[in-house]
């Protein structure tokens, strides 16, 4: 009789846990639904697709092993056309209509800036936003969990490298939006710390490749190097137009342009362009995370090795670790607490740190140069 009661109690507990899990938006007995909004069309489309393919490779790997606590991860991706207004509209639909459990891998500083109040209101976490803007780090926002290092950390590395080379006359190309303003603030602070002379700054309209005026202004300055705070297509156009003026300064850009599509767009003009990186080298099995990445994509036709696809892969790994720690009956608040329990979590050559009032993410930064063969060299 006692044994019978034990099994009844166990069964009741299992039903209770299932009921609680089912009541949480985006979670049922078989799956966890995760929402993504990013520019699958528009000026960042190529890199967004690379990132998402890398993330799906990791989710598929986990799902093939039975998922997280028996649930498969379902990534619901939507296109905002690189328009922050659409980002907000689609996010509300994902939260209120499609009832996703969490948000993941949004792209661009203006998009994340626009959607931040929405996720705070809905109390839904966004993991791995693909931006290094300070708004996702300071002040810490409870429901934002950046994985990559900040843009300010990247420009510190860039400026220090230029100073070491004796490159002191520096021009800056910046998009006229919150992304450009954020990184530009970091550039100015870093140059001031390094006692560099006054530099020239030229801006261009966000979401366009209209860089003619910027090219004219920077070319007149005749810089030794140009730091490009821009999207992939505008960066490609800027380099090509600058070279047509007869000038060939050292072109340096940030990790948001580290996709294979950036190299392809530059074509014969790619050689010598420097790109800062926030992830380990993805083209060889140099560290454990790179090896895991290559193992996951080796038989896939939809994923190519790139820094962008590696970012998606690593961000997916952070999300999965959070889901594991959240337990078999996850809630959004449990996921937040689970992510906050990660202190220097080693992902295999790169670690992330969160905590109550801490959204540091990763601190890994490297500098690469595009070689004559169109490949990134460390």
Image (cartoon, grey):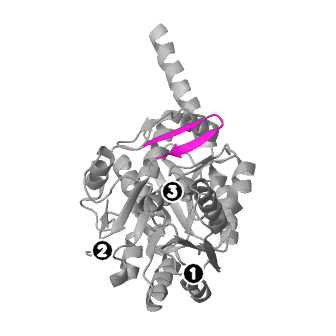
Q: Residues within 10 Å of mark 3 (few under 14, many from 20)?
A: many
Image depth: mark 3 or mark 2 in front: 3
Query: Which element is circle 2 on?
Result: loop
Q: Is residue 221 left or right of residue 309?
A: right
Q: Is residue 48 magenta?
A: no
SS assignment at label 1: helix
Instruction: Name the secondary structure under disc 3.
Output: helix
- Whether residue 111 appears in this view of the structure is no
Distance, label 1 to label 3, CA atoms, is 24 Å
Distance between the alpha carbons at the discs numbered 3 and 2: 22 Å
- Is residue 361 in the magenta section? yes
Which residue is label 3 attached to?
154
- Quadrant of the rendered structure where residue 230 is? bottom right
Q: Which residue is mark 1?
A: 221
Q: Main secondary structure of the magenta part?
A: strand
Magenta range is 351-363
Q: Earlier in the sequence, mark 3 or mark 2?
A: 3
Q: Quadrant of residue 196?
A: bottom right
| Numbered label attached to residue 374 | 2
How far across and down, in percent of the image, does residue 312 sit?
44, 57
User: Is residue 114 placed above or below 3 in the rendered structure?
Assistant: below
> Which quadrant of the figure contains the C terminus?
bottom left
Q: Say which mark, if any, is on residue 141.
A: none
Between 150 and 193, the one lying in front of the other is 193
**Residue 302 appears in the picture as rendered:** yes
* Rendered position, 109 above or below 5: below
Please state which of the two labelled residues, at mark 1 or mark 3, is closer to the viewer: 1
| Residue at mark 2 to residue at mark 1: CA–CA distance | 29 Å
């Amino acid at each position: 009789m006692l044994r019978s009661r034990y099994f009844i109690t166990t069964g009741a507990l299992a039903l209770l846990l299932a009921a609680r899990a089912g009541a949480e938006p985006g979670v049922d007995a078989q799956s966890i639904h995760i929402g993504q909004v990013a520019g699958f069309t528009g000026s960042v489309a190529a890199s967004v697709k690379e990132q998402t393919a890398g993330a799906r490779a990791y989710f598929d790997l986990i799902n093939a092993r039975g998922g997280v606590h028996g649930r498969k991860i379902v990534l619901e991706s939507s296109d905002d056309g690189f328009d922050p207004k659409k980002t907000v509209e689609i996010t509300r639909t994902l939260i209120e209509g499609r009832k996703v459990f969490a948000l993941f891998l949004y792209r661009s500083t203006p998009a994340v800036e626009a959607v931040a109040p929405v996720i705070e209101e809905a109390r839904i976490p966004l993991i791995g936003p693909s931006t290094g803007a300070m708004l996702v780090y300071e002040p810490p926002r409870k429901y934002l969990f950046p994985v990559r290092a900040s843009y300010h950390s990247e420009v510190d590395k860039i400026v220090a490298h230029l100073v070491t080379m004796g490159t002191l006359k520096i021009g800056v190309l910046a998009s006229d939006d919150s992304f450009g303003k954020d990184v530009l603030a970091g550039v100015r602070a870093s140059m001031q710390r390094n006692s560099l002379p006054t530099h020239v700054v030229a801006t261009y309209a966000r979401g366009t490749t209209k860089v003619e005026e910027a090219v004219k202004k920077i070319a007149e300055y005749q810089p030794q190097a140009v730091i490009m705070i821009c999207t992939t297509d505008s960066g490609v156009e800027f380099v090509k137009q600058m070279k047509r003026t007869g000038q060939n300064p050292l072109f340096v850009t940030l990790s948001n342009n580290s996709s294979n599509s950036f190299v392809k767009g530059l074509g014969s003009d790619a050689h010598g362009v420097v790109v800062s990186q926030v992830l380990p080298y993805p083209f060889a099995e140099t560290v454990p995370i790179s090896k895991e990445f290559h193992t996951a994509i080796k038989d896939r036709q939809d994923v190519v090795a790139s820094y962008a696809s590696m970012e998606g892969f690593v961000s997916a790994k952070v999300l999965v670790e959070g889901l594991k720690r959240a337990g078999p009956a996850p809630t959004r608040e449990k996921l937040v607490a689970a992510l906050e329990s990660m202190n220097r979590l080693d992902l295999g050559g790169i670690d992330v740190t969160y905590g109550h009032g801490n959204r540091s993410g990763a601190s890994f930064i490297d500098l690469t140069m595009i070689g004559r063969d169109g490949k990134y060299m460390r």
